[in-house]
Amino acid sequence: MSQDQGRYTQALRNGSEATERDTEPDRPYAVDAEGVEVTYSDGTEAVRGVDLRIPRGEFFGFLGPNGAGKTTTIKTLTTLLRPTAGRVRVNGFDVASEARAVRETVGYMAQETSIDPELTARENLRFACEAYGVPRDERGERIAELLDLVDLADVADKRAEEFSGGMKKRLDSATALVHDPPLVFLDEPTTGLDPKARNRLWDYFREINDAGTTVFLTTQYLEEADQLCDRIAVILDGRIVETGSPAELKRRVGGEVLEVDLADDEGGERGRDGEDENVRERAVEVALESGLFEADATVEPTADGISVTSRRAREHGTDLLVALRDAGLEVVGFNVHAPTLDDVFLAITGEHVGLEGEPAPAEADGGAGVGR
Amino acid sequence: MSTTTGAGSGTPGARVGEAERSSNTFLGDVWVNYKRWNLKAVRNPFVLVVSLVQPVIFLVLFTQVFGGVVEGALGAPGLNYETYLAPAIAIQVALAAAVTSGVGLVNDIENGMFEKVLASPMNRAAVFLGKTLAELSRIAVQIAVVLALSVALGAEVATGLAGALGVVAVGVVFSLWFAAFSNALALLTRDQESTIIGANLLQFPLLFLSSAFIPLERLPGWIQGFATVNPVTYGVDAARAIGLGRDVITVVDVPGVEGIWHTLVPALAVLLALDLLLGGAAVYLLSRASSSAVR
């Protein structure tokens, strides 16, 4: 990086250095978007009026199910798609009229792993260095540094086609960082990875963010957003439906989810799909009347029993099991889990959203058509 | 293509300018991409060899099997079939090798490199120019290899080394329209197999319904008719005029030029026009694909 570029990047990174850019009102934001709409040529309205302000240095999460508009938004912010309407500034540059400056100051890791399989890890990184104009005399050092960061130094001269999915993702993330960008976009970077590979990537992303880089991450997993992000926006059908810290979002959901599976009553009345409606109705009544959970806790029947969403789910879970048994209901299984994205959507929109790879408990079974 | 950053407009101008300077020049961007595609070609010698296999088989089998019979039909006593066929095989190599241009593009789209490059600050015209130049240099090398082989098998190039270089140059000019065509197929189908099959299906009819293997006057009228509008005829005739050192074209007659130029002028004019036309179509499809990189 030339000295000028270095200084410029530094200024964007810290926001403290007094430069002429900092005096402009747009300056504190890595991303400043207003009224963004993207309509595809086939008429699909992928993004319908998104406003985003992401301060520099933030680890920002964009949470939503498949097809919600996450990738379309990222492609708009990285100049790959032109917004149909709205105003977008990234690192202070307009994505339409100053596209090249935007491209120079952001890193982008696409949802699909994007590396040249015929080149080695080192060659992939070298090409990225050349593409982003990293000065020749700094390339070697930068490449070595990044290979270390993503633990690929040992296989640096192996062709990328020989790598596992996780290694490819790590290489891909490294190529997005060659020019030490002040802002990095990561589009579902861990989708399809095993937990170990995912945890390793999470560590790298934390390191990058700790070093001052603003990170814009999209994900379908509340857990991922919860682990990494300072702030989360939830997008559904092209609109942001909620923004807040992970803690705020979880509070919004109202705590943890306790699920209880109940045995059908042998002589009981059968419901439409063969489930024992009676057992579940009685169980819901028991839970509501037990006084174990706060007034705003939600109790609802599921395919196999009931679920209780409550801040006291963990604390009073066993008491509920006892109460159910005392009422003559047979408990065959239970678990307490952190709320999933589906639980968040349920809390925010009052609707379940079908999610790939993270089946919502009540959606997992076709016979779940009861009392939403 | 690349968007101007409006340097000098508004306050950020100066700083933007500095940010930009750290990036490559247009020629630098061309070079970066030229290197990448050459590296890929060397990494994949299989592709290099495969596009040579069929032409070489043709060269050997045709000269050995048909040589004796065809030589009488060439209308030029003392002309061996190797010499007659070599320029046509050079064009066949150009045709076969040009297909890989579109295949490379499809692979790039499939493995995400296409979008990755679009997201980078490199000049987009330079990106594709670098790729095309790498492919044309590879085609030049392949034609040179097959010409050397022809000479080893008994072909003669009447115009010597300069003539051989001329045949290579004609092959490169010829390959451009077919490379553009394969890229257009790639962008329309976004599928490797469709691109290969689509381009390969055309190869044999184009080759056989042209002046490539036998003088046109020995062929049925309908073939002569098709050959008049077949680009392969113009490519083969231009290469052959140089190889034999005399006028060979029969499908058009441009008055006022003599000797090999009587062939070269119309043939090259047709090929260059075709390059521009199909090149333009490919560039249009490419810029459309680049401005909305949605899969």
Image (spheres, grey):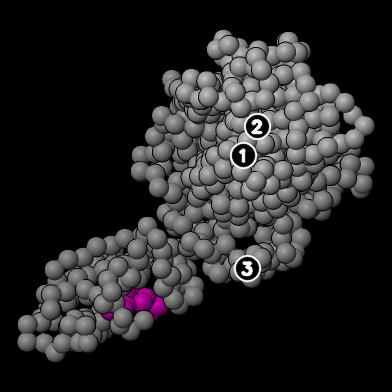
Circle 2 Cα neighbour tier, 10 Å, few/some/many (<14 / 14–19 / ≥20):
some
Residue B258 rendering spot, x and y as whole percentages: 87, 26
Tell if the residue under mark 3 belongs to the same chain as the one under mark 2: no
Q: Nearer the viewer, residue B110 or B202?
A: B202
Q: CA distance from mark 2 to mark 1?
A: 7 Å
Disc 3: which residue: A42
From the image, tell me which residue sits under label 2: B215
In the rendered view, does B206 fall on the left or right side of A348? Answer: right
Q: Do the residues marked 3 and 1 share a common chain?
A: no
Q: Which residue is mark 1?
A: B219
Quadrant in the picture for residue B100? top right
Q: Residue at x 68, y 21 (%)?
A: B76
Residue beneath the point at 46% across and 69% down: A345
Residue in the foreground of this view, choosing between A310 and B290 = B290
Estimate how packed mark 1 is, as few (under 14), some (14 to 19) or many (20 or more) residues with alpha carbons within 10 Å.
few
Placement of A45 over or under A356, stated as above or below:
below
Rendering coords of residue B210 (x, y %): 64, 38
Is B197 placed left or right of B89 in the picture? left
Residue A8 visible in the shown view: no
Q: Main secondary structure of the magenta part?
A: loop
Q: CA distance from mark 3 to mark 2?
A: 52 Å
Query: Residue drawn at (21%, 83%), measured in percent from left and top?
Result: A273
Give the magenta range.
Answer: A291-302
Residue type marked 3:
Asp
Amino acid carrying label 2: it is Pro
